[in-house]
Image (tube, rainbow, N blue to C red):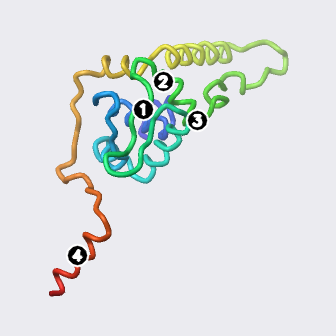
Amino acid sequence: MKEGDTVILSRPSQYAVKALSNLASHPMGSFRMASELAFEEGIPNPYLGKILQGLAKANVLRSQKGPGGGFALAREPKDIRLIQIIEAIEGRASVRAGAEELGAPADGRESALDAFLKGMQSRVQEFLESTSLEDLARDAAPMEVHRPAASPPVPFRRAQVQDSARAGAA
């Protein structure tokens, strides 16, 4: 982390929000492969796959195997709150935790720092509860998306590789 960087969300939560924002930019019900999302958002593919599976278990996403499968939003972007995404990744307790973890001072009085942290935690909580994927997409538009020059990985069947190997040996 560089000096001046601010971290509010963990890296897995950031990746989840990025991937879901990408899904929200496509027509509802469109399934996208984890490898496509990983490529487009610059996220390590195996890591994103695990994150997306967790979001599917939490009913934020739907998953479908096979041709035309992948991941799709389980609800309209306006109905998915950031808090639901973060809690699916971090767990409910870790999102709700905050200033309470500091413990009470020995004299029982709340310090200025304790009061500040509780207020900040409350505002972050309110923001996460009131902000939807649709809000995020609207506030971020128009966004310039950086895409590497290379093509995304293309899934292939094992038989295609064997056929290619046989053709090269002939």
Q: Earlier in the sequence, mark 4 or mark 1?
A: 1
- Residue highlighted by disc 3: 90
The residue mark sitting in front, 4 or 1, is 4
- Sequence-wise, the earlier of marks 2 and 4 is 2
Counting other residues with Cα less than 10 Å from the Cα at mark 3, is it few (<14), some (14-19), or many (20 or more)?
some
Q: Relative to 115, does residue 57 appear above or below in the rendering?
A: below
Q: Which mark is first along the chain, 3 or 4?
A: 3
| Mark in front: 4 vs 3 | 4
Q: Earlier in the sequence, mark 1 or mark 3?
A: 1
Image location (x, y in percent) of residue 87: 57, 30
Kindly identify which numbered label has been placed on residue 163.
4
Q: Which residue is mark 2?
A: 82
Distance Cα–Cα, label 2 vs label 4: 46 Å
The quadrant the C terminus occupies is bottom left
Verify CB contact (< 8 Å) between mark 2 and mark 4. no
Identify residue for label 1.
Answer: 17
